[in-house]
Image (cartoon, helix red, strand yellow):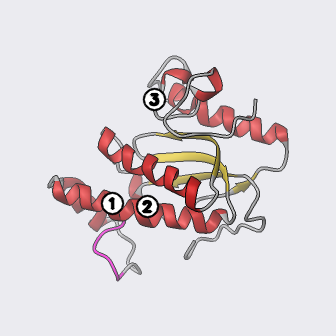
Amino acid sequence: MGRSRYKIYEPTYPHFITCTVLHWIPLFTRQESVQILLDSLKHLQNSDNLKIYAYVILENHLHLVASSDDISKSIQKFKSFTAKELLKMLQENRVTTILEQLAFYKKAHKTDTQYQIWQEGMHPKLIQSEEMMLEKINYIHNNPVKRGYVDEAKYWRYSSARDYEGVDGLVAIERML
């Protein structure tokens, strides 16, 4: 994952992963931008054997517990593809304020592009036990509750909490409970 100081030593094992928009810019406030993320995750489920155990998408970041044949490469593909598609969407819709912010906060060493969508790295944490897996899943599902967006996790549309309540969510997951 580029210049990240976070390393993955067990690339096929489940990891807790966080992807954050540069400078916490609220980019995922419209269904159209979230759909880009969902479509990319679905594609990686087919192409990279991505297994998602839990996820949540909020306005400026997302959390996953996931594994794949090589989770680092899968997330790299995810961030690269979604960055291109999100920039295209922002440019087509002339969302100049956000584009200006993405250009302003872009890291100086990113000389090959005018904009930067994602913060570097993904802060991977290896899931080392069933207890840790359940802890991270609960953390993910309660993120919108903690922020005061919903009263119960199952009401957040862009989360796997619904799947754990027996209702099909927007992305297929590997249920742990």
Q: Is residue 68 visible?
A: yes
Q: What percent of the width, then of the height, locates residue 96?
A: 16, 57
Q: Is residue 137 above or below residue 167?
A: below
Q: CA distance from mark 2 to mark 3?
A: 22 Å
Label 2 packing within 10 angstroms: few (<14), some (14-19), many (20+): many
- Residue at point 57% right, 71% down? 1
Looking at the rendered structure, the kind of residue marked 2 is Trp
Looking at the rendered structure, the kind of residue marked 3 is Arg
Question: Which residues lie in the magenta part?
Answer: 111-118
Q: What percent of the width, then of the height, locates residue 66?
A: 66, 50
- Residue at point 68% right, 36% down? 137
Q: Nearer the viewer, mark 2 or mark 1?
A: 1
The image's mark for residue 157 is: 3
The image's mark for residue 67 is: none
Label 3 packing within 10 angstroms: few (<14), some (14-19), many (20+): some
| Left or right of residue 118: residue 33 | left
Q: What percent of the width, then of the height, locates residue 120?
A: 50, 66
Q: Is residue 89 above or below residue 170?
A: below
Quick check: is 35 in the magenta stretch? Answer: no
Residue underneath mark 2:
118
The image's mark for residue 85 is: 1
Instruction: Indicate which disc, 2 or 3, sits on the residue closer to the N terminus.
Output: 2
